[in-house]
Amino acid sequence: MEKLVITGGKRLNGDVYISGAKNAAVAIIPAAIMAGGVCVIDNLPYIEDVASLSSTLNKLGASCERIDKHTLRVDSTGDITTYAAFDEVKKIRASYYLLGALLGRYKKAEVALPGGCNFGTRPIDLHLKGFKLLGAKVEVSNGIVRVNADRLVGTQIYMDQVSVGATINIMLAASMAEGTTIIENAAKEPHVVDTANFLNMMGANIKGAGTDVIRIKGVEKLHGAEYTIIPDQIEAGTYMIAAAIAGGDVTVQNIIPKHMDSLTAKLAEMGVRVQKHDDSIRIISEGRLDGANIKTMSYPGFPTDLQPQMTALLSVCNGVSIVTENVWDNRYQYVDQLRQLGAMITVEGRVAMIQGREKLYGAKVSATDLRAGAAMVIAGLFADGVTEIDNIRYIDRGYEEIEEKLSNIGASIKRVEV
Ligand code: EPZ
C-alpha cells in the first residue's frame, strides 16, 4: 500500500505537461479489437486503466504490446474470444466498451458487469437499450451481460438522457451494423469525438460526433489504423485548479484550450488570471480568490469530473459557494474527507453549500474515488502542515505520475510505502 504525503503552502511555478485522455483511451483500446488488423495508438496516458485494458485484450486473444511508455500496438488479426467475464474485466467500468466492440465485430459478447468508482449507482440500461434497438438480444445474469444478434440493423435511437458511455458503446456496435444509425441527444464530450475519429480512421463512416446527432453508416469490415489520442481535459483542469489554490504561475502544456472553456471562464470569474495560447493555458493566481457557483452538466458545460477538485478550491475562497451536481446522484462522498482538513460544507442531495475558510489544516485522509483523490491532493497543496492521502490506487487509475508533475512545479509531495 502507498500513500501521498504533501506539505502545503508551497506556491507552484513552471510547466505541467498533460498526458493523453484517460476517457478516450479506455474507449479506443477496446475499439481496436474491431479492426481485425494492427492498430497503433499513441499519446496514451501511462496509467493503471490502460495497463488493465491491455491485459484484458491479451486475455481475449488480441496481442496488445506496449511499444513505448505512451504507445500500444494492438493486433486483432484472426479471431478473438467474445467471452470476457474474467476478473481483470471487473476492475474498470470502461470494460463495458467490449460489449459494443465485440457485438459490432462478432454479433455477440459476454462481458462481466463493470466495476469502477463507487459514487452512486452506475447503471448501463441505456447501453443495453441501444443494443436491443439495433436488433440484439440482451440478457444479464450472475453479473455477466450477454448480447447476441443474428443481424445488427441500423435504426434511430433517442437517448433518454445524455450518456457518454452509452453514446460511445452504441457507436461501436452501429459502426458495423447494416444500414444507418442515428443517435439523437448524443453526448458531445471530447472523448466521444476522439473515439468517432479513431473509428473513421479504421474505415467506419461516422458523422456529427460532437453534436447532439451522430449518424453512423454501418460498414462490413474495419481495418487497422494509427491514431494519436487527444490530451486529457480533466487532468488539465485538475492542474489548473491546483495552480489556482496554491497560488503562483503555472502553464498547462499540450492541451486543447477549447476543451477547457467552462473551467477557464469560472476561474477567471473567481479572480484567477488565465491566458489561453495555441496548445497551453497559463494560470496566474495571487491572493485569495472569490467563491463561485458551479452547476455540472454534460459537455460543453462544467464537467462533473472536475466537481470534487473545484469544491476543494471553493473551500478556501471568499464567501459562500453553491455546487450543484447534475450528472451523478451521489458524488459528494469525498466531502467528509475535506471536512477533516477544516472545510465547511453542507450537502443536501445534489447541492453542496461551501463556506469559504481562510485556512485548512493537514490531516490523514482517503481517496474515495479517482477525482475525489485529486481533490484531496488539491486541498493538501493549500493546507497548513502535512496531509497524508491513502487509497491512492484510485488516483493512479487516472493520473500519470501525479507526484512528479507536481514536484516539478514546486509542490512538496512524495509517494511513501505504508
Ligand atoms: C463517463 O462515465 C466517464 N467515465 C466518467 O468519468 C464521467 O463522470 C461521465 O462519463 C460523465 O461525463 C468514462 O468515460 C470511463 P454517463 P459514464 O453514462 O459513461 C446515467 C472519471 O472520473 N446513466 O455519461 O459511465 C448515469 O448514472 C469518470 O474519469 C444511466 O442512467 O457516464 C449518470 O447519472 C467518473 N444509464 C449519467 O447517466 C446508463 O446506461 C451520466 O452517465 C448510463 C448512464
Image (cartoon, grey):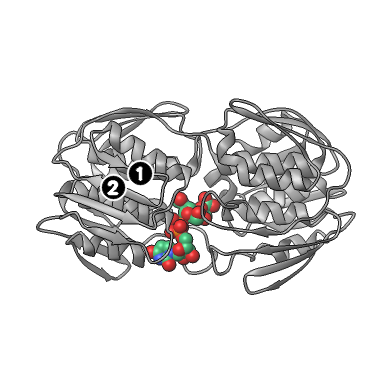
Residue 57 relative to residue 362: left or right: left
* Residue 208 image label: 1
**Type of residue at label 2?**
Arg
- Measured from the top left, where is residue 409 in percent x and y? 74, 30
Of labels 2 and 1, earlier in sequence is: 1
Q: Quadrant of residue 272?
A: top right
What is the crowding at mark 2: few (fewer than 14 residues within 10 Å), some, or many (at least 20)? many
Q: Residue at x 77, y 42 (%)?
A: 244
Residue 190 versus residue 348 in the image, above or below: above
The quarter holding residue 195 reads top left
Mark 2 → mark 1, Cα distance in angstroms: 6 Å
Q: Which three-letter amino acid code belongs to the residue tagged 1? A: Gly
- Give the residue at x 83% y 36%: 11
C-beta proximity under 8 Å, tags 2 and 1: yes
Location of mark 2 (residue): 215
Percent position (x, y) of residue 35?
A: 23, 36
The spot of residue 367 in percent (x, y) is 64, 56
The residue lying furthest to the left in this view is: 150
At numbered mark 1, what does the secondary structure look like: helix, strand or loop?
loop
